[in-house]
Amino acid sequence: MPHDTQDTPAEPAPPPARPRQVVVWQHDRARLQHDVIGFGDVQSDTAYGRLLVRSLTRAQLGLSLMCLALAVAVVASLPVLAALWPGARRIAVAGLPLTLIILGAGIYPVLMAIGWFYNHQASQLEARFIDLVDPADRRLDG
Amino acid sequence: MDDATAAAAIAFVTLLTVAVGARGVRIARTPADFMVAAREVQPGLNAAAISGEYLSAASFLGVAGLIVSQGLGALWYSVGYTAGYLVLLLLVAAPLRRFGAYTIPDFADGRLASPSLRRTTTVLVLVIGWFYLLPQMKGAGITLQLVLGTPYWAGVVALGVVVSSNIAMGGMKGVTFVQCFQYWLKLCAIGVPALVLLIVVGHGSTRNLSAEHGPLFTHSTTVRVQTSTVFTLDRPAVVHVTGLLDRVSLDHKQARIAAGRHIVAAGAVLQFGVGAPVPTSLSMAGSSPAMWDSPFLAAGTGGAHPLVATYGVIIATLFGAIGLPHILVRFYTNTDGEAARRTTLIVVLLLSTFYLFPALLAVLARLRAPELYLTNDPDSVVLALPSLLMPGRPGEILAALVAAGAFAAFLSTSSGLLVSVAGALSHDVMRGGVGTFRLCAGVAGVVAILAALPVNRFSLGLLVGWAFAIAASSFCPLIVLGIWWRRLTWIGATAGIVVGGGACCCAIMATMLGAAAHGWGATLLGQPAVWTVPLAFVVMIVTSLLTRQAIPPHVEQVMLRMHLPEALTRHTYRTGRPYSRT
């Protein structure tokens, strides 16, 4: 194959910054490689296809782990904070204890926001991958 | 509580469930049809079905009961149950759907190509499934006990018979519709009473919510003692007593009772005035002023090392949802990986909405119905609350609604679990078809009934938390590593499941038998997830690295199937090497 993979820069993809992620497709570069690589490589398990799939799974895992770290940081930090700052539990807002406000309702929108962010990013990631290996202008069925 | 209204409501829910389930009989023909609905369920519908199946007795009755008896730290259970779905969304939702397995043994065998691992996972599906069935059965037992006055076993047997016969007839196709309907029923059954009670009695003072003192009576209350009980007062109180108190017989006497423990005989009548401290029964002893607003959990560990116990519950619930045997099958009914992600996000929303209400009910119980602290079974708090707060017809109707919702919770979760258990039995143990599946549904129901009879004394929240802990320390590492780590081997997976799941089961058994009542022993045995989950991951990874020769040869293809967006495999012109599920 004419292209070489070690040439591919190990720099973070534009949104958002993810460390340790090997980017093997970039929008402009991928355009040039249309007639060279593609879904055929992925399907017939060539070295390049294998690399493509690995980079996809690595990007997906990176996204998942980042969001997981965020979720765990939100949930698991609360008991530690409460232990470090015992006075916090005595705080009451409008007669309601802080524990009730945070654990009873406040934490749920945060969980939802992390989930929504992940879904959005994951769809974009997959769309970029599809665009790389199977560009719309080369599809036979539309 | 009006027996007739509540009984009618429960009967209605049960009949409706059977009727909706029966619709599926005509459509379900093959064994696959019986176990999973054909893959045509839309995200909104599917998310409601998942939530309907997931919200069990523990959510409906257990969380509120634990908050009342142990304080606000019990909210960690509802937070964990919801966050568990977020973790599931982040780590496994789309790949699991793309893999296309509909049971955990299928996933294990398909990913690691090992019949022996399939057998190990089948055994664990049965263990977790049956363990999770226990609290559902207990919930049915105590609900019918409270509503109809039947003995505990009657409710257990009734639920077991209804669920197993329904599954034997309809299978999963019916169950999908049933579960979806059950979610909305449960949301209404807990949301409407909670909001009505909030509007009617929720105004005014919030002093019972402060942690300066234990709950105080908000109106003068007469307590009739049914069975001899020990109760605790956190402050001295003046009480009007008729009957035997602390072995002294009193007749319409004004007595000053000191703070501390007292014993009261059956038949005694105690009258408390406004502002008197509420005596708390032994089972509610955790709800002292200091515990009420504590953000930590004490359930199951005797109150020792609350921070570690809290993390035990967080780890178990966060990672347990991935490993529950009846949840995976629901991902198979999504149209593709993208839909699986959307479904799971909607599930997080539906669960968040639901869990607002048990907390609200528990707070209302503390605020306006402190006499509930005299109850001996905290799990019946939600059932008893409406008629206590709203005497008369409206209260009865709300109570009937709550009872019906609770029964819907037992029905839906135990249906899902029994399908998984019966599926594992018929598919992996007996290797039979539809007939065997029906037989196994009956057998699994009978086993669950027999096992549920002796667990009456454990709280619902605790039992469900333990089922989550077993799932988190066995199937969760298998599925997560199986999806993301190419070097997982069947030997490593087996070792991790046996060591992690086995250690967790042993710890729970030891706690149930009363091996350690306080200190580190009680904490580490009562909330084992805090050490068994990391243990399972470590054993699985280390053993896999030591047995590299056992890495399955088709691992790249399986990885491709799990992680490649479906859009790439859908186009019709591609004929070479299809990666469709076979």
Image: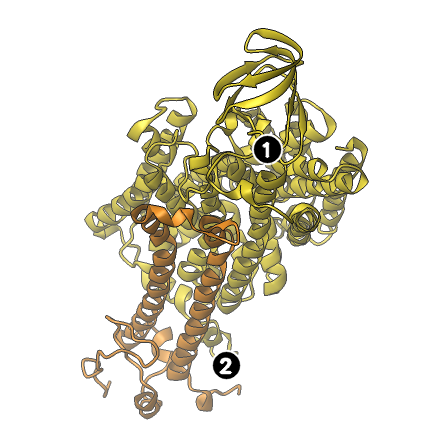
Chain colours: A orange, B yellow
Is B556 on the left or on the right of B216, as rendered? left
Please tell me the numbered disc located at residue B275. 1
**Within 10 angstroms of label 1, few (less than 14), some, or many (20 or more) residues?**
few
| Nearest the eye: A70 or B156 | A70
Residue B195 vs B442, above or below: the answer is below
The image quadrant of residue B555 is: bottom left
**Where is residue B165 shown, x and y percent of the image?**
69, 37
**Where is residue B57 shown, x and y percent of the image?**
58, 40
Is B114 on the left or on the right of B258, as rendered? left
**Where is residue A106 shown, x and y percent of the image?**
48, 58
Evaluate whether residue B424 shows in this view: yes
The image quadrant of residue B454 is: top right
| Nearest the eye: A61 or B190 | B190
Residue A30 vs B317, above or below: the answer is below
Is B15 on the left or on the right of B560, as rendered? right
| Nearest the eye: B32 or B9 | B9
| SS at circle 1 | loop
Evaluate whether residue B483 shows in this view: no
Tally of numbered discs: 2
**Where is residue A42 shown, x and y percent of the image?**
35, 75
| SS at circle 2 | loop
Residue at 54% x, 42% y: name it.
B207
Give the labeled residue for mark 2. B573
| Nearest the eye: B39 or B43 | B43
Q: Amino acid at mark 2?
A: Tyr
Chain assignment, label 1: B
Residue at 71% x, 51% y: name it.
B24
Q: Which is more N-terminal, label 2 or label 1?
A: 1
Q: Amino acid at mark 1?
A: Gly
Residue B284 vs A53, above or below: the answer is above
Residue at 51% x, 40% y: name it.
B67
